[in-house]
Amino acid sequence: MADYTKMWTDLGLNHENHNALLEYLGGAYQSIFMSQEKRPEGMSYFDFVISEAHGLRIKELCDEREAGRKVIGSFCVFVPEEMVLAAGCTSVGLCSGADFAQEEVEKVIPRNTCSLIKSFFGFNLGKVCPYMEVSDLIVGENTCDGKKKAFETFKDMVPNFYQMDLPQTKTPAGRQTLKLEFMRFLNQLEEMTGKKVTLEGLKEGIAITNAKRKALQRLATLRAADPAPISGLDALLINQVSFLDNPVRFTENVNKICDQIEVEIAANQGVKKAKAPRILLSGCPMAIPNWKLPTIIESTGAVIVGEESCIGERGLRNLTDDSANTIEGLIDAIVDRYFKIDCAVFTPNQERVEHIKEMKAKYNADGVIHYGLQFCQPYIMESFTVEKQLEKENIPVLRIETDYSQEDIGQLSTRVEAFVEIIK
Ligand code: BJ8
């Protein structure tokens, strides 16, 4: 990586903390990702993006800002990227997947808060996240109680916070709330940029976002092949990168790797290989560098063939209908698309269980591992329903509750190994 010290100083990062984080990330990446055998050639692009995630990518975002573009940071797949792009802005994800500055964090929010929330507080307090610092607007949403209440504190820690309200039921009133909030968000973007969003702009925003989701859906579908053509770790990484990278360039590179994988699958036809147990992972989102559980699972010889998660299929399942020819019509289409997201903050949320069953069948998984972050009430509560309903259909399930620490690796490995033995 080139020397970006000046850029990091200008962004207000704490060098000592930031260097410690980069060192940790680099080491973890080398040992987890680069040690895998027979990775698809196209992974080199995503390796490069990760190696420059705090360098070149941030430089690109700084350059975009200098050219007058605004950067919008968010923590949830409910923030509509179509609208961000239509307003001539760039969207980046701010969820983080590692503990940082925990002592400081626990002075401002309770200890028994989920790791994802504690992590972005830590990244902010430790001044180690260039994406947060480069954002012109930070959008927090009213989803789970943890985030909703934590944002009451977080909003005073950053100068540019925007709160988005979200419904919790799939009722007509819920849809109306979502539409009003999306329209308020669009107004906010227009106010920031001083420009009105046009029909063409919205069409383009939808086209770019749909193309990205189609490419990720293509990759997801290819994982149904047996043997799986890509590790779950690499597929997760690609999904994680989708929240940071330039969307058009990202889409091109996902399609490139899919082209290669298709060739590989064709070449493998008829070749008999020892079957690896196939796992569907379901539950809370896994932000970079939260690779703990997938690493444990794949080190047993099993392969993860799908992620029922917001950094995975829940975030990319539906496309936005682009057929309307009015701004209002396209806004309605965007609302319809997002209203289908089956996050556990919704009640009731039977669609999610149905999606897990569909994914299990589609990717020919032998079992489901439900991943809940400790203190994440929505997903941990739902994990019991998920388990009960899957077991009724004789689908093996393992419920895991963990956090970002490394302390439970031994215990998790034992449980995962035993589960993999059962489904073999
Ligand atoms: S649409 S899953 S990205 S809210 S892990 S902070 S739920 S206590 S992240 Fe999410 Fe949007 Fe839903 Fe997806 Fe709360 Fe649970 Fe923590 Fe979570």
Image: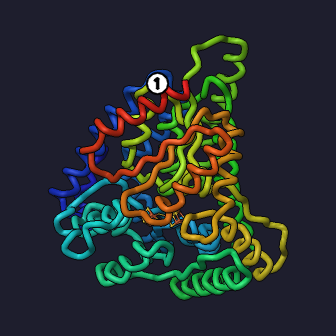
- Helix, strand or loop at label 1? It is loop
Residue at x-position 64% and y-position 69%: 348
Residue at x-position 43% and y-position 78%: 148
Amino acid carrying label 1: it is Gly
Residue 22, image x, y percentages: 26, 48
Name the one closer to the observer, 218 or 42.
Answer: 218
Q: Badge 1 is on which residue?
A: 301
Name the one closer to the observer, 93 or 45.
Answer: 93
Residue at x-position 68% and y-position 71%: 339
Instruction: Answer with left or right where residue 125 lies relative to residue 403.
Output: left
Quadrant location of residue 132?
bottom left
Quadrant location of residue 136?
bottom left
In the displayed structure, would residue 302 be above or below residue 241? above
Query: Which quadrant of the figure contains the C terminus?
Result: top right
Is disc 1 surrounded by few (<14), some (14 to 19) or many (20+) residues within 10 Å? some
In the displayed structure, would residue 195 be above or below residue 204? below
In the displayed structure, would residue 227 be above or below residue 411? above
Instruction: Answer with left or right where residue 240 lies relative to residue 25.
Output: right
Residue 65, image x, y percentages: 44, 70
Instruction: Answer with left or right where residue 75 lies relative to residue 219.
Output: left
